[in-house]
Amino acid sequence: MKQRMSKILAVVLAAVMLLALAACSSGTPAGSGSPDGGPVKNPNLDDGVNRVGICWSSFSAEATQILMANYEAHYKEYGIDEIIMLEAEGNLERQIDEMQDLANQGCDIIICNSVDPDGIAPVVDSIQAQGIPVIAVDRRISTDVYYTLETDNVCCGRDVARTIAQMTMLDEDGNLAADGSVEVLKCVGNMTSSAVRDRFSGLNDELQYWPHLNVVGEPSVESNIEKVYNAVLDGFKTNPNIKAIFVVGDNQVAPVVSALKELGRLVPPDDPNHVIVASVDGISSVVKGIQAGENDIVANQRFDLFCTDALKVIQDYFNGDTSIQGVNNKLPTMIVTRHNVDYLQKNNYLWALPANG
Amino acid sequence: MGKDTAKLARGPLSLKKELTFQSVMLNYGLYIAMLATFATFAIINDKFLSLNNVVNVFEQAAYYLVCAVGITFVLVSGNNDMSVGSQIAFSSVIATIFLAQGGSIPLSMGMMLVFALVIGLCNGLFVVIIGLPPFIGTIATGYVVRGIAANMTKQETQYGLPAAYTQFAWNKTLGLSNLTWIAIAITLLGLYILHFTSFGRKVFACGGNAKAAEVMGINVKRVKIACYMISALSAAIAAMMLMSRLGAARSGTAETLHTECVAAAVIGGTSLKGGQGSVLGTLLGVFFIAMIRNGLNSQGVNAYWQLVFTGGITLLGAILDSYKSRANAAV
Amino acid sequence: MEQKEKDYLVIEDIHKSFYGVEVLKGVSFSAAAGEVHGLLGGNGAGKSTLMNILGGIYSKDSGRIFIDGKEANITDSKAAERAGIAFIHQELKLFGLRSVAENIMISNLPTKGPFHFVDDKKKNEIAKQYLDEVGLQVSPTTRLDELSIAEQQQVEIAKALSLNAKVLIFDEPTSSLTSRETNILFGIIRQLKKNGACIIYISHKSDEIFEICDKVSVLRNGENVGTRDTANTTNDELVSLIIGRKLDQYFPELPPAPGPEAETVLEVKGLVNKKLNGVSFALRKGEILGLFGLMGAGRSETARAIFGLDHLFSGEIYMEGSQVKISSPRKAMKTGISFLTENRREEGLVLNADIRKNLTFPILSRVSVPGIGCIRAKTEMSLVKEAFKRFLIKATGPEQRAATLSGGNQQKVVLSKWFMTDSKVLILDEPTRGVDIGAKAEIYQLITEMVEKGLSVILISCEESEMMGMCHRILVMRDGEIIGEFQRDETTQEELVGLCIGGKAV
C-alpha cells in the first residue's frame, strides 16, 4: 500500500512542479478585470455592512495618532458601519499581509499609507483586481489607485520660502533689504522620500525669486537630530549672521532651538538678533513654540482634511458616486506664524491644538 | 510472556479500548487547543474561516512553510539551525543587488543555491565535524552572514528586481498563488524524502540514537551535514519567494524567522531532542501559527502580544510532548 | 514452614495497576531479620514493580506492608528511607562527580557553625567508618567516577548503612561485576546478614541465588508462585516455577564443531591498541568461538577493534583469506562482519523508533530502490514479518516503539536485526544480559540455528556456564592478551575462572 502511495506522491509531485514552471511564464496577471471587459464587482459590498479598512505604515507619529483618533471619532457620520485600523510598524512584509487580510475580511474599501510605495504596489493591484478600491493617504502608491490624498509638497516648500522672504523683506530701518543680505541655512533632509524632494523643489524654486535671500549653507542632516544640532552650530561658526533656518520636518525643530540657545541666539522675535526657524508639519510642540516665540513659521499639513476628505470620498462611494476615481488630490498647507496662530487655534484649524485643548 | 505483559509493553497510549481523559489529552490535546482557538476566532469574526481567508493565510505562510520543512530535517537529525533567517537576508540581498545591475534570473537563483550549499557546509563543519553545540555554531554562521549583508547594503533596502521576478508572486495558477504552489511542492518533496526514503530513515536514526546509528553502519556525520545543507537550500528558496513578494531585500529581514519555524515544528510533534518528527506535523504547525496571527491581526492586536501568544502555544506543545514521553517511559 | 518469630518484613496481598493493566495481582511474601531472601522471575513478572513499591517510588493500590510488626505507610522514597529500607539499584544512582564521602552522606551532611556550612572533616570521618564496615579501602575524598563499578556499588551499600537501613534490596547487583568482585559482594552481604539486616536479593542468576540466599520466592505474572528454602530445592524446580513449565534442556545441542581442516573465515593477527596487546586468533566457518575473561580483559575491545569502532595502532585482519582494512562499522559490514554491542540501550536500538525501523536500519539498501532510495514498503514488511516469526519477538506489532519492549524482546530485536544482515561473521557481546530465562533459551536456540546455516559466531560473555554451554572453542583473555585456548570438552568452568583470576597461562 505504501509503495503505491509513494508512486502516487511522485506523480503528484511531478505534476505540481510542472504547473509551477508553467506558472512562471503564463500566470493570470493581476488587474486584468473580468472576462467580459467591464469593471469587476466589489465582492464585499453586498454583505450588508459598510466596512472600511485602514492600513497605516506606523502609529508612532503624533500626527498619525491624532488622525486615527479623528477617524474613529467621525466615521459613523459618513455612513460607515465599521472600521478596522491596523499598522505595520514600518514593516513592508507585514503591511502586505495586512492589506490582504483586510480585503479578505470584508472591507469594502481600504485606506493605505504605504511603508514603501513600490513594494506595496503588487498587493494593491491584486486587491483592486478583486474590485475593492484602495485610497492612498499622505503617501503615494506607485500604481493606479482609486483616489490619492496627499499634501501638495511643492506648493508647501514654495509657501515657506515666500513667508521667509516676506518676513525679512525690510531691514532694521524699514527699507528694502539689500540683495543677498539675508542669510539662510537650509538643512537638507532625506531625499529618498518624495515628499521631502517635493518640498525642496518648491523651496529652491521660490528662493531664486527673492534677491535679498542668500542660501549660505546646505548641510545634509537626513532628519538626524544630532546632525541638525551640529549643522546649526557649524553654520553659525562660518556665518554668524544667519537670519533664517529651514528644516523639512517638525521633528528637527527641537535641535535647532537647542542649538540657538547654546549660541545665545534664542531671543524674542522683536529682537534684531532673532533667527527665524521655519519647518513643515504642524505638531503641537512646534505650534506652541510659535506661540512662545521660539520658532516662527510652520507649514501646517492638513491632517484634519486627511480625515474628513477621505471619509467623504468613501461616503460617496457607498452611495454609488465613483466620479472621484483616479483623482490625485493635493492639499495645500496652511502657513502658521505668530500673527495668525491664536486665530487659527480658536477656529479649530489646527489639528494638533484643538480649540479647547 | 503473558497477555498482560504484552498489553503492558504496548504502552498506555495505544490501548485502543482505553479512552481515558488522560490519554485523549496527551495525544490530541494540541489539536483540541487548535480547534478551540479557531472556533473562538470564527465566532468573533465571521470571515475567519472563509475559504478566501484560509487560502490567503496559506499564501502568507508559504515561505515560512518552506523554511520550516528544511529545519524539520535538522531537528530530526538531532541538531538545530539558528542561521536560517540570516541566510535568507544574505542571499536575498546579494541576489537583489545582482539582479538590479542587470544579472539574469536563472543565474541569480543558481548563485543563491550555491551560497546555500556553502553555508550549509559551514554549519555542518562547525557543528558536526568540530563538534560545537548547534546553538553556538549556527548562530555564529548567522551573524557572519547577516553582518556581511548589512555591511554591503549599509542596512538600506535594496530595490530593482526585474518585473518578471516580482510579478511571479502575484500571479495565480489554478486559483492559488504561485508561491502557494511552490510551498506545496517543497512540502511534498520534504515529506517524501524524510518519510519514504532510506536517507530519511537514516536521519531518524542519527537523531534517535547517534551511537547506535554509527554501529549500524550509518555515516552519521554525513547525514547530519546533509541535513544542514537541506535546511540551507530551503532557506534559499524561501528567500526567492520573499524577494518576489516584497520586490525588495533588506539585511534586517527575517530576524525572528528561526524561532517561528522551530515553534511550528515543535507544535507539529518534532522533538528538539531529535529522532522524532514529521513534515505533515510541521505543516500543521505552520498553518496553526499563521491562522492565529491572522486572527489576532484582524482584531488589531499588536505584534508583541502576538509573540506572547506564539510563545504560549509553543510551550504548550513542548509540555505535552514531555508528558507524552514520560508516560510512555513509565511502563 | 514454621516461623519461630514474627518475620521482620511482611508484604501482604499487594495489588498494583498501571493505566488499567494489573501488574501485581496480590503478591505476598515475608522475610526475617538476618535472612537473605532471593526474588526470581522473568522480566515483566513484577519483581521491579514490587521493589519499587517497597522503595517508595510507586505507590501500591492495595495491600499492606509490615516492618518489624508495625504497618508501614510508604508514600515516597523519603518515607521508605525513614522506614529503614534501602534500595541498591541495578543502575547505580550516585553522583559521579562528587566524592565518595559526599555520596555516602548526601542525605545527612554534618554541618558546623551558625550558617550550617558542611563540616568536611566530620563528613570524611563518618564516611570512613561506613567504608570500613563494607571493607572498601579507598579514601573518602576520592571522586566517585574514579572507582570501578564494583567499588561504586560498595559505596552505595555504605550509604545504605549510613541511613540505618534494616531492609536492603539488591537489584541484579552482579550484572556489572566479575566473579571476583561478586565474591567480595557476597562477603559483604553475609556480614550484613550477621548484623541482623533483612536482605532481598533480586537476580536471574540461579547459581547466585543458591549460593547466597536462604530462601527464594518466584514471581510470575504478578503473583508469588512459590517460596522455597534454597537448601531444599533445585535449579530445575526454580526454572520450571519461573517459566511455568518444565524445561528439559537449557542449552540447545550445538552443531558439530568444525575441525582444524575447516575453512578459516576470519583471522586476526597482532591487534594492538590502547587496550590490546597483540591479539591473534582464527575463526572457522560454522564455529562458535567464545571470548572469556574478567571485565577489562579486552574482549569487547577486541570486538570493537575488529568492527572498526575503535582505532588500531597495528594489526592485520583477514576475511576469508584476503586482508581487509576496516576503518568504520560500514566497512566492517561490507566485508561481512556484524557486531551486537553489549549495551543495547546505548548502542543497539533507536528507542524512540518502532520495531520495523529498528530492524531495517542496517539493511536499508536491501529494502529501498537503488539510486533514489525510496523505501519499498512491501519488501520491508515481508522481511519484518519473517523476523517476527523466526525470532519469536513478542510485541503488539511492528509499529510498537522499541522503548516499550521488555529487555528480552529488545535483545531479540537487536539480534534479529543483525541476523538479517546476512553477514558471514557475527560477534555477540553479552547477548543474554538482562534477559529472562525463557528468552535466554530462545536466543541460544536461534544462535544455533544460524550457525547451522553457515554463520560463524564469536561469543563474548562473563558467564562461565554460558561459555561452556554454547561455544565449540573458548579463548581466555586477560590484560589485552589471549592467555588460553580450550576445546569445550577439554575444560571446566572452574578452570576457566581460575585462569582469569591468576593461574598460569597455558
Image (spheres, grey):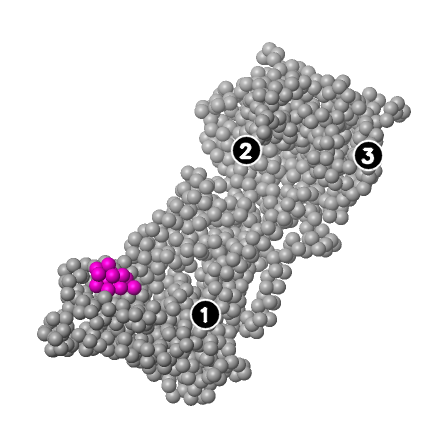
Residue B107: percent from the left, percent from the top? 32, 59
What range is drawn magenta here? A254-266
Amino acid type assigned to the residue bearing label 2 in the image: Ile
Provide the chain ID for the residue under circle 1: A
Local secondary structure at mark 2: strand
Image check: C387 left or right of C438? left
Task: Classify 10 Å Cα crowding around label 2: few (below 14), some (14-19), many (20 and above).
Answer: many
Image quadrant assignment for residue C291: top right
Q: Residue at x 31, y 66 (%)?
A: A251
Q: In the picture shown, does residue B263 fall above or below A33? A: above
Image quadrant assignment for residue B331: top right
Quadrant of the image for the C terminus of chain A? bottom left
Local secondary structure at mark 3: strand
Residue A193 sits inside the magenta stretch: no
Label 1 sits on residue: A86
Same chain? Circles 1 and 3:
no
Task: Classify 10 Å Cα crowding around label 3: few (below 14), some (14-19), many (20 and above).
Answer: few
Label 3 sits on residue: C71
Amino acid type assigned to the residue bearing label 1 in the image: Leu
Residue A263 sits inside the magenta stretch: yes
Image quadrant assignment for residue C404: top right
Residue C109: percent from the left, percent from the top? 62, 27
Residue mark closest to the camera, 2 vs 3: 3
Residue A135 appearing in the image: no
Label 2 sits on residue: C337
Mark-to-mark CA distance, 1 and 2: 67 Å
Q: In the picture shown, does residue B162 fall above or below C464? A: below
> Which of the two residues, C396 or A242, is positioned nearer the viewer here?
A242
Q: In the picture shown, does residue C39 fall above or below A182? A: above
Residue B151 appearing in the image: yes
Residue B18: percent from the left, percent from the top? 73, 53
